[in-house]
Image: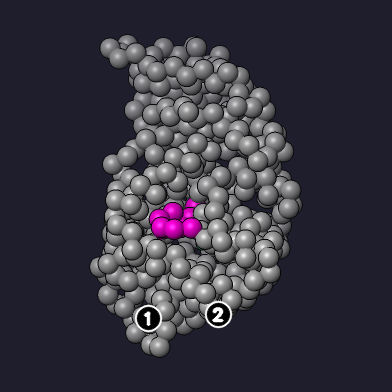
């Protein structure tokens, strides 16, 4: 047996280790989830150096180290990769609880907007909030996500809708690189969320500002550029011109596509080689074929359907067309105020016809693909040691035992964060 470098972290007594694929070189991993029973994961620094059967780990000699490894006893429970939330609107101020109650009492979104609610309401609260307030709000939400097993979070701008505030939202997302005990934040620029009220009279000028001024100014600070391609947001032509510029500037591409109506956003995502197309409720069969052929990940957001009492996304259609499916919270103050990916797995299994393995891959391996990340989402040597440690004896409790937190703690970049 070869010698291992000295581990700094050993997670032992794992009843079920879900590596999320038998193809990643982990010994004894089997089935679609690459399950290893009676397993150990060891890390050195941020990186996994061993994952596999405990019996095999015990055969290895570890090089001597002056620093004793931190040992975590998983108590015979389940360990998975840290969960990945590939679509959130993390940074905003204010909430819209009143609007939620009004909507379920029968008020239309148009009526709520007429009272100053909706996205414009969040935009005003966000513009009025200082950098420190926004950091504090985002930190609180990231802690909640982490408590529920999430270790990587995509965070969109899009509640500033002016240059200074969009800049501030990107700075808030970037701040969390200095708080490595929190989930890793992947920033996305969504200046094209909606046209803000003050620009309604000249939307072309707003689109030109996003494309020709903000996109070059923010290049390198956001990993992705996203556009809300929809009837009341941005047309297909506007979306195309913004995303083509973004691609030229080095942004990865995402789209809010076919959410409320069919606009052609999904086909555009395929044509431009977007990393993901999100929502997709009204995508046609041909759209789904294009997405599958182009390798675009479909990100589905069942928390919105739950909140709005709307039909759930048609996951089985995507899967039948060969589209890789990720599940995300869409955490935002209007249509899904929920940090918990476990809940999305429960909704996907109970209401979208996804199998539990499909749903678990959708919040790990496929969610990593939706963020173009190749260092997380599975458990294997060489990858980041991002883990979720579950308080359950078998993974079939996930989704079935719902509405409570089944995660006991996480490991982020090799650092245990047990609550
Ligand atoms: Zn969204």
Q: Look at the image and give the residue range highlighted in magenta.
A: 86-95
Secondary structure, mark 2, is loop
x and y, in percent, of residue 378 in the image: 51, 38
Residue 196 visible in the picture: yes
Q: Nearer the viewer, mark 1 or mark 2?
A: 1
- Identify the image quadrant of residue 315: bottom right
Q: Is residue 288 magenta?
A: no
Whether residue 87 is in magenta: the answer is: yes
Point 57% across, 38% down: residue: 20
Disc on res. 231: 2
Mark 2 sits near ligand 1, with its Cβ under 8 Å away: no
> Are the residues flagged by discs 1 and 2 in contact, CB closer than 8 Å?
no
Q: Is residue 154 above or below residue 404?
A: below
What label sits on residue 198 in the rendered view? Answer: 1
Q: Residue at x 60, y 33 (%)?
A: 406
- Which label is found at residue 13? none
């Amino acid at each position: 047996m070869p010698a291992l470098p000295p581990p700094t972290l050993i997670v032992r007594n794992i009843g079920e280790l879900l590596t999320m694929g038998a193809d990643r070189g982990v010994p004894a991993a089997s089935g679609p989830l690459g399950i290893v029973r009676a397993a150990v994961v060891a890390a050195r620094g941020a990186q996994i150096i061993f994952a596999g059967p405990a019996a095999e780990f015990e055969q290895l000699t570890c090089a001597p180290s002056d620093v004793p490894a931190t040992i975590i006893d998983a108590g015979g429970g389940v360990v998975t990769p840290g969960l990945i939330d590939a679509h959130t609107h993390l940074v905003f101020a204010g909430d819209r609880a009143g609007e939620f109650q009004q909507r379920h009492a029968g008020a239309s979104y148009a009526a709520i907007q007429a009272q100053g609610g909706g996205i414009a309401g969040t935009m005003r609260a966000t513009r009025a909030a200082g950098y420190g307030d926004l950091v504090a709000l985002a930190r609180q939400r990231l802690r909640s996500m982490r408590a529920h097993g999430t270790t990587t979070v995509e965070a969109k701008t899009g509640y500033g809708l002016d240059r200074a505030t969009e800049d501030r939202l990107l700075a808030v997302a970037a701040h969390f690189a200095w708080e490595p005990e929190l989930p890793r934040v992947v920033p996305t620029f969504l200046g094209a969320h909606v046209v803000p009220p003050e620009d309604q009279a000249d939307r072309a000028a707003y689109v030109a500002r996003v494309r020709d001024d903000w996109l070059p100014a923010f290049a390198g600070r956001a990993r992705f550029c996203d556009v809300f391609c929809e009837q009341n947001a941005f047309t297909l032509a506007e979306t195309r011109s913004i995303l083509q510029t973004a691609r030229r500037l080095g942004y990865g591409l995402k789209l809010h596509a076919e959410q409320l109506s069919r606009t052609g956003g999904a086909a555009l995502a395929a044509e431009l080689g977007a990393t993901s197309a999100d929502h997709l409720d009204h995508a046609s069969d041909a759209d789904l074929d294009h997405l599958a052929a182009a390798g675009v990940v479909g990100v589905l957001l069942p928390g919105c359907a739950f909140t709005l009492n709307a039909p759930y996304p048609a996951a089985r259609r995507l899967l039948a067309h060969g589209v890789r499916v990720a599940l995300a919270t869409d955490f935002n103050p209007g249509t899904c105020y929920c940090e918990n990916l476990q809940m999305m797995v429960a909704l996907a299994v109970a209401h979208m016809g996804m199998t539990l393995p499909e749903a678990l891959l959708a919040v790990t391996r496929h969610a990593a693909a939706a963020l173009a990340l190749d260092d997380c989402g599975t458990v294997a040597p060489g990858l980041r040691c991002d883990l979720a440690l579950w308080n359950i004896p078998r993974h079939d409790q996930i989704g079935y035992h719902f509405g409570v937190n089944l995660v006991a703690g996480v490991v982020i970049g090799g650092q245990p964060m047990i609550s």
